[in-house]
Amino acid sequence: MSFVRYEQKEQYAVATIDREKALNALNSQVLEDLNTMLDGINFDEVRALIITGAGQKSFVAGADIGEMSGLSKAEGEAFGKRGNEIFRRIETLPIPVIAAVNGFALGGGCELSMCCDIRLAAENAKFAQPEVGLGITPGFGGTQRLVRLIGVGKAKEMLYTCAQIDAQEAYRIGLVNAVYPAEELMDAAEKMAKRIARNAPIAVRATKKAANDGLQTDMDAAVAIESSLFGSCFETEDQKNAMGAFLEKRRPDPFVN
Ligand code: CO8
């Protein structure tokens, strides 16, 4: 049995973390199930991935506190490293990933949402990094991605105070892209996934790679990365198809993977 349900819907897929009785908390098994889910994605068909949590109440309420409570130093480090490896895999997945945050996104849950490209939140979503209240640091990338996403000052406030913020505040500070009534969240996420899937998939992938890789380096190297990926698009059928269609004032043929 897997704690991650995966459903492919034409050109996008939905992965649902389903450990509802523990508010979808991430134990080692959930992490490995996430990893296995990533192994199974058919990138020839799937052009965007949505990650959400089962139920109405929680996206992911963090790493599993019961499992973590007895860890030794070495085990804690190994658990953090494994979580980071899998989250980094999500962040660098060739296709865009949308987090549909349908409730609590605490600790590892907030960190999971932040390794996705885009975060959409339900009105009942709550975000926090409660780790220092539990005697640990964030361990799945929170100290790094939060400062990059919302800026150092606001991130440090969240990291040091453990304060929980609601969806509107998360939107105000740029942690989420948009907020929807809970019952509209998945429709909005799927609509966005379909919009992404309509575009030239090789160009979308190259754009994600340029943005991600560029963020890791200085501007001169970053624009060189962009130039190289931009150039590579001119070898694709999609570029010839789309630009030819524009010049001939017709719709392009369907894009290819
Ligand atoms: N771990 C394990 N179980 C959890 C977790 C969790 N993070 N969150 C909720 N649960 C379980 C509860 O224990 C409870 O189980 P049971 O019914 O068996 O008692 C069930 O889910 C329902 O939870 P509550 O009864 O507490 O529901 P409430 O509505 O009263 O409260 C809250 C909801 C506010 C979300 C509350 O459950 C809570 O505070 N949960 C903990 C949130 C938290 O602190 N998360 C951060 C954990 S630390 C972390 O994520 C670090 C990531 C990096 C790790 C690196 C490791 C080295």
Image: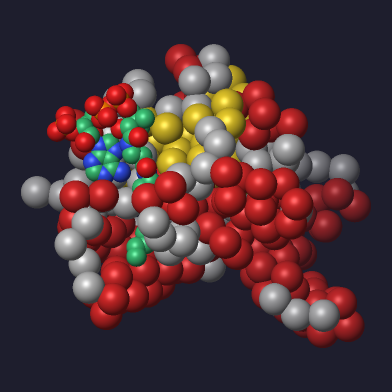
Left or right of residue 221: residue 123: left
In the image, residue 91 sits, relative to residue 186, either above or below, namely below
In the image, residue 227 sits, relative to residue 257, either above or below, namely below
**Where is residue 223 shown, x and y percent of the image?**
85, 77
Foreground of the two, 158 or 49? 158
Left or right of residue 254: residue 32: left
Question: Which residue is found at the position 87% from the left and 43% from the top?
Answer: 249
Rendering quadrant holding ligand 1: top left
Left or right of residue 228: residue 65: left
Q: Judge whether residue 242 can be spotted in this image.
A: yes
**Where is residue 173 shown, x and y percent of the image?**
73, 38
**Where is residue 182 shown, x and y percent of the image?**
48, 18
Question: Which residue is found at the position 90% from the left and 52% from the top?
Answer: 247
In the image, residue 257 sits, relative to residue 157, either above or below, namely below
Q: Judge whether residue 140 can be spotted in this image.
A: no
Foreground of the two, 240 or 139? 139
Which of the 4 image quarters holds residue 165?
top right
All told, the count of numbered labels is 0
Question: Which residue is found at the position 83% from the left and 57% from the top?
Answer: 243
Task: Report the coloring of the rendering.
Answer: secondary structure
| Residue reaching furthest to the left | 1
**Where is residue 59 shown, x and y percent of the image?**
39, 36
Quarter of the C terminus within the rendering:
bottom right
